[in-house]
Amino acid sequence: METRLNRIVLDSADPARLARFWAALIGGEPSTGVAGAGADGADPATHLDAPGFPRLAFRRVLPASDPPGGGARLEIEVADVAAAEHRARRLGARDGEADSGADSGADSGADSGADSGADDTRPPGAAPAGSVRELRDPDGNPFRLTSLPGRSAGPEPLPPATGSMTLLAAAVVVRDPVLRRVVMLRRGPEAKFGRGLWDVPVGKCDPGEAVSHAAVRELAEETGLVVDPADLRLVHVVHGARGAEAPGGFLTVVFLTERWSGEPVNREPAKHAEVCWMPEDDLPTEVVFSADRLLTAALSGVAAVTLRGWS
């Protein structure tokens, strides 16, 4: 008889928020349907379908002093444990049972944009490649990152030539074609550059991360909006000779999407003053360099390249 795991239920005081965390980590798009109690007594109206993964359902529970999870544990096989752990921590994950005394994920997502330090490739206590790492999601549900079967760590990689590397970043223009508006954010007084100026959601790629995955991760971290990488369309490229903490220059790949879930909120108030919809025919003029040109290109449908700082 064939047995199949169809669904995993996770407890959370905020199911929608937890669903966004898992969508950013493993892919897929959270959806909300009509709630109906299952065989396990759960009443999860929010669920996530990710490729190659059982359905995750999120059950609303009242906050408790003890973390949820019980004996259940998700085990996720990844090509690079260290890179996956780094991404999970920046999304809000923290140490699991083995090192639960240190909540190293508390500040891991505080500065994840393109203005983050270019040499921040692995958080303190990160697992070496090819190992196993025990973590907990933002609501305390335990999960484990392991290497894909048959994959060996291989020879020690050469150190990256960070002094001459170009920083790779991704930006997303979220457009509402019906109401003709786009999502923008205004950088706060403590931002490392562009203080008080408007910009689109943007951030740097993590080591080993595809640029389209970085785009949807940064969008979720900054605005709470969830987008499937398959719904991104390449519209513009910005190549700068230098940038904030990018002495080797930066390359920003700009995507456009007209499909998303959620409503924009300011999820990083330490970096941004506000996040909101802006009408296409009344966009702000006080913008971060190149933001006006990339918006024009994205909304016109004409792909282009913006060069900045090159003689």
Image (tube, helix red, strand yellow):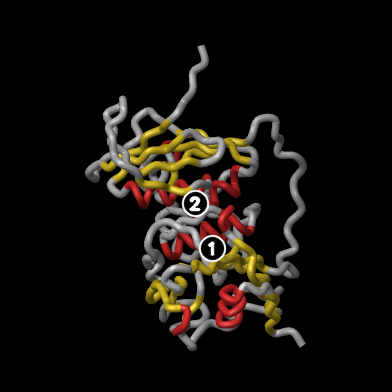
**What's the amino acid at mark 1?**
Thr
- In this orientation, which residue lies closer to the viewer: 70 or 102? 70
How far apart, in angstroms, are the residues tagged by discs 1 and 2? 16 Å
Secondary element at tag 1: strand
Query: Residue placed at 46% from the left, 26% from the top?
Result: 5
Which residue corresponds to mark 1? Answer: 257
- In this orientation, which residue lies closer to the viewer: 243 or 267? 267
Q: Which mark is residue 228?
A: none
Identity of the residue furthest to the top in this view: 1
**Is 215 left, or right, of 187 in this rendering?**
right
Query: Residue placed at 34% from the left, 43% from the top?
Result: 33
Across and down, in percent, residue 22 comes to 45, 46
Mark earlier in primary sequence (1, 2): 2
Up the image or down, 125 lies above or below 144; here it is below
**Is 49 left, or right, of 15 in this rendering?**
right
Across and down, in percent, residue 262 comes to 39, 58
The 10 Å Cα crowd at callout 2, few under 14, some 14 to 19, many 20 or more, is many
Query: Residue placed at 48% from the left, 38% from the top?
Result: 134
Across and down, in percent, residue 156 comes to 75, 45
Do labels 1 and 2 touch, CB within 8 Å? Answer: no
Of the 4 image quadrants, the one containing the C terminus is bottom right
Across and down, in percent, residue 208 comes to 65, 52
Up the image or down, 102 lies above or below 265; here it is above
Q: Looking at the image, can residue 250 be seen? A: no
- In this orientation, which residue lies closer to the viewer: 116 or 251? 251
Up the image or down, 299 lies above or below 257; here it is below
Q: Quadrant of residue 271?
A: bottom left
Q: Which mark is residue 24?
A: 2
- Foreground mark, 1 or 2, reads 1
**What's the amino acid at mark 2?**
Ala
Query: Residue placed at 29% from the left, 39% from the top?
Result: 35
Secondary element at tag 2: helix
